[in-house]
Image (cartoon, rainbow, N blue to C red):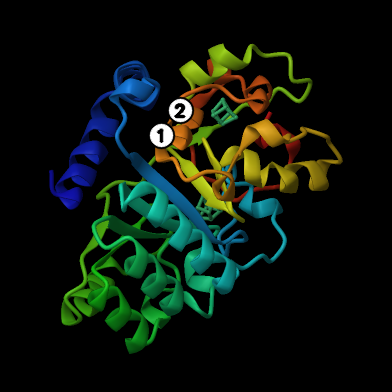
Amino acid sequence: MNSNLNMILMGLLYKIIPADKIMKIQTSFLQFILRKQHKLQKCIHYLEISVVDHCNLNCKYCANFSPLAQKTYLDIIDYEKDCRKLSEISMNNVETIRLLGGEPLLHDKLEEIIFITRKYFSQSRIELVTNGLLLLKMNDDFWRSCSDNTIIVSISHYPIKINYKAIQKTASRFKVTVSYSKFAQPMFKWVLDIDGKQNSNESYLKCHRSNICVTLRNGKIYPCSMIPYVRYFNRYFNKELLENEQDSFDLYQTNCFDEILLFLSKAVPFCKYCNPNNIIYSNKWEISKREITEWT
Ligand code: SF4
Ligand code: SF4
């Protein structure tokens, strides 16, 4: 389905049916039928790359802890090396790549990142996920690079002032596809169990991020974006939700894509820190006060 139409329908659906019910339907379908079954997998469906960890918006409940993040930019040389390796092992079998953050438009080498991504993943759908605040300030080189590399600019719709018409006009001038929902999306609150007392397998199976927000970072593949970014939560609140070696898969330790897919289809030790039973899906959007209760 056309992604714009998809977003509009999802927006309408959120208006009619409570968000938590939608998420439960989506989650059970995706989890049990598609994403957690290694035998059904031939590719990575969604791969996320954090271009910049910090953000210019700082939303309450941000799933990637951006309000707590220090300024951190993707290293171009390491990124190219990782893309080359993953594209070789996977034989280009990554369906959708999402360049996000934080706010990816804050990276001053964004055009190079876009170029590298397309160079190694010629078949993938590539989305640049942004809050849209900086889009009208981007220069022609940015829009040309989106156009030349067939990038879809996907704007996450928050209840903030964004001139969608003007963005659409600029994008059309460069023949770039822009997608956004007609309605602001509800924020979901992820609930961490800081004592790590959850059952990892159960959390993984109930989690709507596991093997869906697959994340590539510093030569490693993670089943979700939670694990590589929790360091910001730990540092800010002086906690120790520890990542260990089994929580990620080292790209350089294998030449077999199936090993990666098998890893992604199972719980990792870190899942003990997640409590999907208590997730609250339909929260009002607000600016973060950086309180621990936004994530626990
Ligand atoms: S715009 Fe996105 S990345 Fe930025 S703080 Fe909000 S939810 Fe997080
Ligand atoms: S650590 Fe496990 S349960 Fe938590 S978000 Fe990641 S995959 Fe889901």
Q: Position of residue 5 (x, y in %)?
A: 15, 47
Q: Is residue 85 above or below residue 110?
A: above
Give 201 or 64, whichever is nearer the viewer: 201
Q: Identify residue type, mark 2.
A: Leu
Query: As drawn, which residue projects farthest toward the front?
Result: 255
**Dot 1 beta carbon under 8 Å from ligand 2:** no
Residue name at image x 47 percent, y 41 percent: 214
Quadrant housing residue 239: top right
Quadrant housing residue 35: top left
Give 250 or 208, whichever is nearer the viewer: 250
Give the CA distance from mark 2 to mark 1: 6 Å
Tag 1 secondary structure? helix
Residue name at image x 54 percent, y 23 percent: 279
Crowding at mark 2 (Cα within 10 Å: few <14, some 14-19, many 20+)? some
Quadrant in which ligand 2 is drawn: top right
Tag 2 secondary structure? helix
Quadrant housing residue 142: bottom left
Q: Position of residue 129 (x, y in %)?
A: 40, 58
Crowding at mark 1 (Cα within 10 Å: few <14, some 14-19, many 20+)? some
Residue 262, numbered circle: 2
